[in-house]
Amino acid sequence: MRVLLVGAGGVGTAVTRIAARRPFFDLMVVADYDLARAEAAVTALGEEGSRFRAAHVDAGDESAVSALLTRHGCDVLLNATDPRFVMPLFRAAYGAGATYVDMAMSLSRPHPERPYEECGVKLGDEQFALAGQWAEAGRLALVGMGVEPGLSDVFARHAADELFDTIEEIGVRDGANLTVEGADFAPSFSIWTTIEECLNPPVVYESDRGWFTTEPFSEPEVFDFPEGIGPVECVNVEHEEVLLMPRWVGAERVTFKYGLGREFTDTLRTLHQLGLDRTAPVTVPGPDGPVEVSPRDVVAAGLPDPATLGDRMRGKTCAGTWVRGTKDGAPREVYLYHVVDNEWSMAEYGCQAVVWQTAINPVVALELLATGAWAGRGVLGPEAFPARPFLDLLTAYGSPWGLREQ
């Protein structure tokens, strides 16, 4: 397997450090708009970096990405950029005849008239619209293969296959007790993506109603997270799992709730009120005359890079899937989860916990594709594949998962 990794930020860098310890690929080209960042990711691997190359590429330039895939004979494109670049990279992979893997799906657009009741363009709609084309060509696009979406979806498939006879509700629940020393507001993941998913109308699925939307931060609940994290208030947030799981897993209801905390949600609301969550450029004065900038890009530029926070970060992060249903005629309720301690991920990989937890899952998936344990054609989510090989390999990577009976 020869892999083109596009994006050498926090998650991309973590991908290289995890993958460097595994033998399943021959070459990984690490490409970024900032060549120095790609080179730094490769150089940091030291002697383990012999199978890695750094390259420059503009993720929005489909022809340049396709040419880079062809030049290096890469048969897989792993997208580690933010969701703005999903579609150009998705199309570039198809054009070059490569398998495509991402961790977030094509962007949504709210319903123009009833944004908090009806879906407009849903997450992933643009990709699924081309599913037939990918299937007919015998090519695979594995979408939403991070931690959430990704591992959370694998948990849902595992629950359906081995733990339940019928499923009433699947609820992804994400929480943490992470703190960053010396920072009042320092998101542990891309603020661009965080704003996108948190301020868009959340999507809920019900089998008798289909997909519908609610207001941001709706239906608050307190969820007790394992391994010492404890109770955290969680709220509805737009996320790919709600759009993916019902396609392959039978459930009466599917939700995604994020443990953001009141201070975090208040900050996001303020950004929205000030218009700083917008992506459309605005004109501002510059030293050489007016320039156009995206308010959201300004916010991102003004905050610390999440990849640099590890040394000041303390605590654990938990990603998991809560499932309620029946087994052998009796009610059952479980929480399948994956916890990463920042102190461990920094000591073992030099990566902060959130980006490392995101990065390990596409690497596991790549290895399953390389060995043939996972195979398919079309545009498929993680639920379309058997869960057990993934969960076993995740444990073999030294990062076990857990199951708690509720």
Image: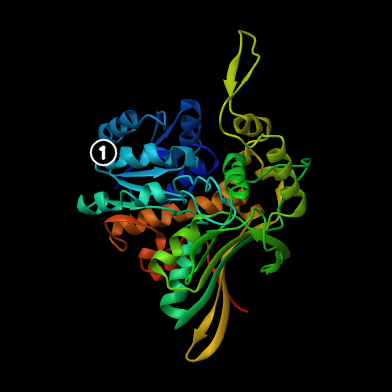
The relative height of residue 315 versus residue 286 in the rendered view (above or below) is below
The relative height of residue 120 versus residue 211 in the rendered view (above or below) is above
The relative height of residue 246 versus residue 377 in the rendered view (above or below) is below
Quarter location, residue 183: top right
Residue marked by disc 1: 95
Q: Nearer the viewer, residue 22 or 136?
A: 136
| Residue projecting furthest to the bottom | 329
Circle 1: residue type: Gly
| Residue projecting furthest to the top | 288
Q: In this rendering, would 230 be left or right of 391?
A: right
- Is residue 389 visible to the viewer in this orientation of the structure? yes
- Is residue 338 visible to the viewer in this orientation of the structure? no
Q: Secondary structure at mark 1?
A: helix
Give the residue at x 53% y 81%.
325
Q: Measured from the top left, where is residue 404 in percent x and y?
A: 60, 76
Q: In this rendering, would 27 be left or right of 189?
A: left
Q: Measured from the top left, where is residue 312 in percent x and y?
A: 72, 44
Give the residue at x 29% y 40%.
74
Work out which quarter of the rendered image holds the C terminus and state it. Answer: bottom right
Q: Measured from the top left, where is residue 321 in percent x and y?
A: 55, 67
**Mark 1, residues whose alpha carbon is within 10 Å: few (<14), some, or many (≥20)?**
some
Give the residue at x 43% y 53%.
362
Quarter location, residue 63: top left
Q: Measured from the top left, where is residue 387 in percent x and y?
A: 41, 68
Q: Nearer the viewer, residue 297 or 207?
A: 207
